[in-house]
Image: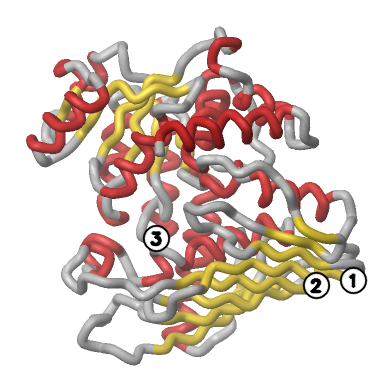
Amino acid sequence: MSTRRHFLHQLSTSAIAVSLLPSWVQACAAPAARYEGPMLRVAIMGLGSYGTRVAEAMQTCTKAKLVGVISGTPAKITAWQSKYNIPAKNCYNYENFDQIKNNPDIDAVYVITPNALHHDQVIRVARAGKHVICEKPMAVNAREGQEMVDACKQAGVKLLVGYRMHFEPHTLEIIRLRKAGAFGKVLFFQGLSGFIIGDPTQWRLNKTLSGGGSMMDIGIYSVNGSRYMIGEDPIWVTAQETKTNPEKFKPGIDETIQFQLGFPGGAVASCLSTYSLNNLDRFFLNGTDGFAELLPATGYGPIQGHTNKGELNQPVVTHQTVQLDAMAGILLQGQQPPVPVGGEEAVKDLKIIDAIYQSAATGQKIPLSL
């Protein structure tokens, strides 16, 4: 499997280098032997399933390297030390990780913990003088998100958010085509994001840790996707919540939310976020002169898409590998991504999610000012 992944990575990066994608993508796609610039040295905080996925993807990065871990489970730390050759001096727990301020071998911390923990952990990392990459949603509401942005600015460190789709080639190609006018005036976007969630005792179904239900997990993809696919920020939102299993989905944990967004150029978005339906991973963009579809749109497997002109044949990449290499360029070399990934971008998504919850609770149309 590792050989196949390496082959796909090499094939993908070669293809990117000759495509019309932005120049920073070409830089991250260069073979490892050719890259002689600075290496982003990353510690991962939170060694769960997604932290493991990121760690595996980093093994083929050319500009970022896994050098440290932060976890509350000693056995995980020991296992990761052995697997990834991490020195003991770069291993911390949740009580002592403030000491990274004295460790010159760590440049950034990637926070991959339950949503409600992000706020305090990101602020502590910032005060320790390290750059922060935080998984999405960045916080449980816009107020906390803004406090995180402010803390990082005050500490003089950068805050990025794990928007991996902002670096995915099929996604970027549709954005490029939309900017070039290939679809004419954009009028409509549909985002479907959902799956049937399993274990009822997991943290995602615990409001204290998650901050909400499907919207705070899978729904953010349609929230964020509507913005980068249409190319504008919404100015109003309406939303409706449906709950069929109140035993599994306790108060404060949304099961299914349908929401609609209005945009200043006249486009509207119709989206669905759910924990009760599988096979929902689709983006559809429609304009006066054409359309684009991604199906699947945000999953870990190969993204596939087509437009009214035919199939998209962009390279297949490991999302987290491309993301971390690109973020290394942003943090260490001041490169600019084609779609923003900073904390301010995440605050906009959180303002939308706050308004979605407000609309679902009140039945009112909520104006937005992002």
In percent of width and height, residue 344 lies at 53, 46
How far, Cα to Cα, is label 2 from label 1?
Answer: 7 Å
Q: Quick one: quadrant of the C terminus?
A: bottom right
In the foreground, 61 or 368? 61
Question: What residue did someone put label 3 on?
Answer: 141
In percent of width and height, residue 97 lies at 19, 29
Residue 288, numbered circle: 1
With 98 as the anchor, is 365 left or right in this view? Answer: right
Q: Amino acid at mark 3?
A: Asn
The residue at the point 27 percent across, 65 percent down is: 204
Q: Earlier in the sequence, mark 2 or mark 3?
A: 3
Relative to 339, residue 66 above or below: above
The residue at the point 25 percent across, 50 percent down is: 117
Q: Amino acid at mark 2?
A: Leu
Mark 3 residue element: loop
With 368 as the anchor, is 99 left or right in this view? Answer: left
- When asked about the image quadrant of residue 293, the answer is bottom right
Q: Amino acid at mark 1?
A: Thr
Relative to 238, residue 308 above or below: above
In the foreground, 6 or 149? 6
In the foreground, 341 or 68? 68
The residue at the point 52 percent across, 19 percent down is: 332
With 179 as the anchor, is 211 left or right in this view? Answer: left
Q: Residues within 10 Å of mark 1 (few under 14, many from 20)?
A: few
Would you say the residues marked 2 and 1 are in contact, meaning their CB atoms lie under 8 Å apart? yes
How far, Cα to Cα, is label 2 from label 3?
Answer: 29 Å
Question: What residue did someone put label 2 on?
Answer: 187
Q: Quick one: quadrant of the N terminus?
A: top left
Please indicate, yes or no, whether residue 141 appears anywhere in the rendered image.
Answer: yes
How far, Cα to Cα, is label 1 from label 3?
Answer: 36 Å
The residue at the point 50 percent across, 53 percent down is: 301
